[in-house]
Image (spheres, rainbow, N blue to C red):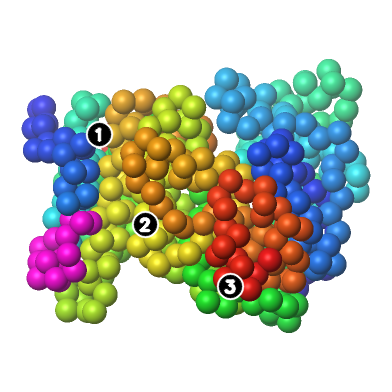
Amino acid sequence: MAAMPPALSPEQVIARFDDVIRLPADALVAAAPELGEELLLLGESVLESWLVAHNRQPTEARVEGFRLLGLHRRAAKGDPSFNACRETCRELVYYRNLVQAGPGHPDVAQRLRLEAMVARHLALFVSSKLEVAGFGEFCCSSRPLHAQDASSAESD
Amino acid sequence: MSDKYRRVAYYPGCALEGTGHAYNRSTKEVGKSLGLDLVELRNWNCCGAMEVKNVDPKLQTYLSARNLAIAEDMGFDTVMAPCNGCYHNLKKAEYELGHDAKAREVVARISTKAGHSAYQAGHVTTIHALDWIKEAIGEEGLKARVRNSLKGLKVANYYGCMYTRPRHIFPEKDQGPGSESSSKPHFMDDLLAAAGAECVEYPLKTACCGGAHTLSDSDTSTKLVLNLLTTAEACGADVIATECPTCHSGLEMHQVRAEKVFGHATKVKILYFTQLLGMALGLSARRVGVPENLSNASDLLRARGLG
């Protein structure tokens, strides 16, 4: 079954991250939990774009309770992949959790901005990789790593 | 503290003789100031960098293995490589020679042809400059030697991608307390904090800088670097500390390019961690190569009484 195309392109997602980063602190505070969740979902949509572009089904599976990490695990398998974004995805989840755990925390606006900046890095990397598949393949040596996993690319 | 790292083989690699010259200079100066002895490998060669790995990964393994063989011939069991790319490639060669019969066969064949003995896995340990100072001196040892504290200097520590990836070639990392973490590395944070710096929480410390694509796709590299810079500024950093010449050059060049091409200026300064440590140890900015950097940090350093 073919997957539905994601609602927003990576470029549109990046523009949304830029908008969030530019929001004044009081607007960020007022919408903290919702924005934190939206940024995480937009991060998921970036990974969905990657999988759909490679004729692979975006998984609903969760890793450590997060679909973003499940999508990354699936996308990091096969060739090409973006194993290099593992830590970026985990940081995105971390900031989302901080925002959810403390929507009234004095640093919540800062945390939301950092969440958006981390998510923007993920989107920048993936959108670049959609254009140039080899992006990041040899500097952090993800290719030899995921080549070993190629046989189980769709197993999760 | 470990006495075994007081005298180690030194593999500067190509970048430290070119664009990363300030890293070479500051690493040697810091070593001298700390009483550590670096003995440069004789007739070392390129580690294979990214280019050879792209074309023939086994040839890259040989090139790195030859450097390890030289270290062994010189009587060393430890080689220190400050460049992330060199460090990564030597570690990768070590791993492959221990796990891949084909790699051993290729290295043996080329080594015979080149007229030297083939390196066998397990004889030489590759360490990074961070491991070197952390193990040989440690935070407490560093604190005791600081003459010009980095107090008040807010630093975002940027480790880049090759210091921790892929995890399986760094078996000594993620071994619990005292070891380095591959997901949230902290050795540079630890050392600079010991020198008095205030290390900010920086969520992109291992994120991609687009370094390998800086010539083929400059706009992408600039956008990635700009995000690294603006995020560091959002974290309150005055300085991004680096530990890789490729990352360092990329951050500096794309900081300039981001302003020219995208009209987005950033103020955060970029310094090698060895330059910051050197100044904390009382060395002048010139001595640790700060004037060689593209990123002009002189006003900031003067204001902080450094250099």
Q: Secondary structure at mark 1?
A: helix
Which residue is denoted by mark 2 in the rendering?
Answer: B231
Which residue is denoted by mark 3 in the rendering?
Answer: B304
Q: Is residue B176 magenta?
A: no
- Badge 3 density bin: few <14, some 14–19, many ≥20, Cα 10 Å: some
Which span is picked out in magenta?
A20-35
| Residue in front for this viewpoint, A52 or A122 | A122
- What quarter of the picture does the N terminus of chain B occupy? bottom right
Spatial CA span between label 3 and label 2? 23 Å
A3 left or right, relative to B240:
left
Which residue is denoted by mark 1 in the rendering?
Answer: A50
- Badge 2 density bin: few <14, some 14–19, many ≥20, Cα 10 Å: many
Please tell me the numbered disc located at residue B68.
Answer: none
- What quarter of the picture does the C terminus of chain B occupy? bottom right
Point 67% across, 24% down: residue: B59
Amino acid type at mark 2: Thr
Q: How many marks?
A: 3
Spatial CA span between label 1 and label 2? 24 Å
Of circles 1 and 3, which is in front? 3
